[in-house]
Image (cartoon, grey):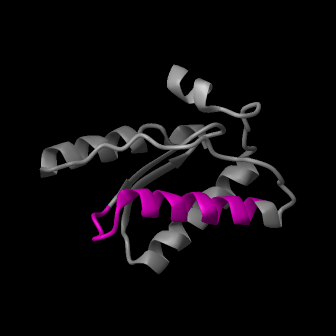
Amino acid sequence: MQTNKRAQLQDAVRLSKAQQQVVRKAITEEAASQGQRIYALAVHPTHVHVVAQYVPQPISKIVAYYKKAARLALKALGHNGRLWTNGYDKRFCFDRTTLEQRIKYVQGHKNNI
C-alpha cells in the first residue's frame, strides 16, 4: 500500500458502484477480445483483482490493455484524468491448488462491488 501511495501522482480515485460495473464490463470484454479467460474479477472503489488464464503475451501488455479499456470506458461516461498508478502486483500460479486459492481470495472480495 505504501509503495502504491508513493507512486501516486494525484489524489486517489474512488469509483462509484456504477463505475465499478463499467470497469468490470470493460475488463471482461477486453479479456474476451484478447482470448483470455478471466477466472475471477473483483473491482473495488480503489483497486482491481484479476485472476486470468495464461496467454502467450507479456503480463505488462495484458495489464495495459485492461487499464486502457477501463479508462476509455470511464472516459465515455465523463471521467477525465489519471485513473491508475504505474505498475501492478502480479502473482503467478504454477499449480491447480495455488490457482484455486487465488480464485477463492478474489471471489471473497466481490462483496465490495
| Left/right of residue 42 with respect to residue 56 in the rendered view | right
Residue 113: percent from the left, percent from the top? 61, 44
Which residue is rendered at x = 64% and y = 57% of the image?
A: 23
Residue 29: percent from the left, percent from the top? 54, 73
- The answer, for residue 1, to whether it is visible in the render is no
Which SS does the magenta portion mostly show?
helix
- The answer, for residue 5, to whether it is visible in the render is yes
Query: Is residue 93 one of those drawn in magenta?
Result: no
Q: Is residue 5 above or below residue 96?
A: above
Residue in front for this viewpoint, 37 or 85: 85
Q: Is residue 32 above or below residue 3?
A: below
Total tally of numbered discs in the picture = 0
Residue 53: percent from the left, percent from the top? 30, 63
The quarter holding residue 67 reads: bottom right
Residue 70: percent from the left, percent from the top? 64, 60
Q: Is residue 51 above or below residue 57?
A: above
| Left/right of residue 47 with respect to residue 11 in the rendered view | left
Which residue sits furthest right?
Answer: 78
Residue in front for this viewpoint, 101 or 88: 88
Instruction: Give the residues drawn in magenta, as a range.
Output: 53-74
Which residue is rendered at x = 35% and y = 62% of the image?
A: 58
| Left/right of residue 6 with respect to residue 56 in the rendered view | right
Which residue is rendered at x = 36% and y = 68% of the image?
A: 37
Which residue sits furthest top?
Answer: 2
Which residue is rendered at x = 71% and y = 34% of the image?
A: 9
